[in-house]
Amino acid sequence: MKNVKKIIVVDDEKYYGGDFKDFDLVFIKNTKTYFLDICKRFVNLSAIIIDVNVDFEERVNFIKEIRNDNLLNKMPLFVTTDKELGDEEIELLDLGVIDVIKKPFSKVVSKKINNVIDVSENEIEKLIGINNTSSLYKYIHYVISGNQHKKYSIIMVDIYKFRVINDIYGPEKADEILVKLASEIERVNKKYNGICGHSYADQFIMAVSEYDESFEKELKEIEANINKSLDKIRISLKAGVYDVEDPNMPVITMCARAKFALNEIKDRFDIRVAKYDEALKAAISKENKILSDMKMGINEGQFKVYYQPKYDVLCEKTVGAEALVRWVHPEYGMISPADFIPIFEKNGFITEVDLCVWEECCKFLQKRKNEGKEIIPISVNVSRLDMVADGLVDKVCELVDRYGIEHKYFHLEITETAYANDPEKLNRVLEEFKSRGFVIEIDDFGSGHSSLSILSEMPTDILKLDMKFLNSKQDVHIRNKILYSVVKLANLMNLKIVAEGVETKEQLDYLRKIKCNYVQGYYFSKPLPEEDFEEIIDNENNVLHE
């Protein structure tokens, strides 16, 4: 089986000539932060090529991000250009770029790139001590296709949040852990009479003919052995398994399916091993359908804004609303946000959806203003990817100002978990928003791991406390004490509190008793289409004026 090297190319030009026919080139146009996640999703990525003819500074910053990423910093990196760069070329080489290649390409360019990849993979193989992806795929194909009477399973194993090891101990210790893991994988592999090798970064692949559920015990034993050499943290291992159905299937497809199963449990602390099965296959099919239809959804106005009212606890009057997106698909009907939001966050499309929602909210507020009706604040969600995008503040200001909306009526909801990614930049962006008159709300307060610290660091006006974060199995007195403490702390800091997920009169009564400011939830109203929401506001105003 011929091994095809996969290369990600950041370039508007999508034709690199016949000399690159032996590479699998994946072309990407931009270098937004989420692109790093795209790189990490490939099973056998061999190199990255970046063209710097467009926005040299942006591309340099992207190269720095790659070199600072613990999983990508050893990836062979090339730069292309059709200009004379001068000192800029030295800057690129200082950043760890292998070579700066002039366009149009000569016939030897692809040969040079291929040789660099081979050397890089051989160095990794020498460090790890077992096969790398290039030789491993060939060997797996040879064995499985030559023993079609046997049933094989592909297993992909990796260390959960491996980058933490690099951050705490440094690259030398991280390499030491990889060598140790390789040794442990090889030890277990012998028990299963299989094939094993290194895939990428902290990921390893096994092909075994006698897989059973005892493998999970082996993972636990590997964890214990590696953790003996770590004093500050404890690693945990995850594995994805694909039972081979067609021995003639390309090995890269087998590995991709094992990796897909692995990705499904990466953030699940209660699951170590996941199998690629019919349910997961259906989920992949649905995800692909969502991805193929997302652009059409924007262009045809299939994404609708629903408004969930916020009520004043004392007078039970509507004082605002949260804007929530719904996808009304022509084939599937109403698609749950839980099905498409994670996918859009993963591929970056969430930024377009957010912009669509923001504009619809501005249109709604402008409509009420033009009709002389009461305007109440609308809260919009700002995703993690929105926050890292350049020029976010100016973009939002331009949009809101274009519709003649006062900034105080356009609240921005930031999830607490977004704070963990780049707290310094997040604080700078939020400070700028506040200086321009926007109101900042922290959503899902209490669901992250740094709630108390962010109160003193993150500029905010309103905390949104999700009632669901309080375990329903807890004693009611314990839950109430936690609620009381959070509300009292917010009051001391002059912060308003919105309690989300309020579903019962008992909850409302207690929130009123402890001086919570606002509530949101099904006790009062589910998320509503614009017309229904507007009717609620107008009816309340008519009653007040009678």
Image (spheres, grey):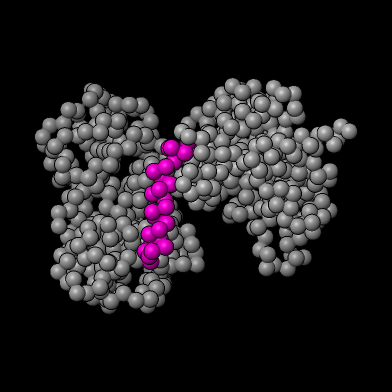
Left or right: 445 with respect to 283?
right
The answer to which image quadrant residue 177 occupies is: bottom left
Range of magenta residues:
275-298
Give the x, y percent position of residue 242. Answer: 32, 65
- The rendered magenta stretch, by its main secondary structure, is classed as helix
Q: Residue at x 37, y 77 (%)?
A: 214
**Vertical order, 374 against 532 (above or below):** above
Furthest toward the left, the residue is 107
Is 416 inside the magenta-drawn segment?
Answer: no
The quarter of the rendered structure image containing the N terminus is bottom left
Q: Residue at x 38, y 54 (%)?
A: 285
Give the x, y percent position of residue 88. Answer: 29, 27
Furthest toward the right, the residue is 546
**Vertical order, 532 against 450 (above or below):** above
Is 289 inside the magenta-drawn segment?
Answer: yes
Q: Nearer the viewer, residue 474 or 65?
A: 474
**Vertical order, 471 against 399 (above or below):** below
Q: Is residue 283 visible?
A: yes
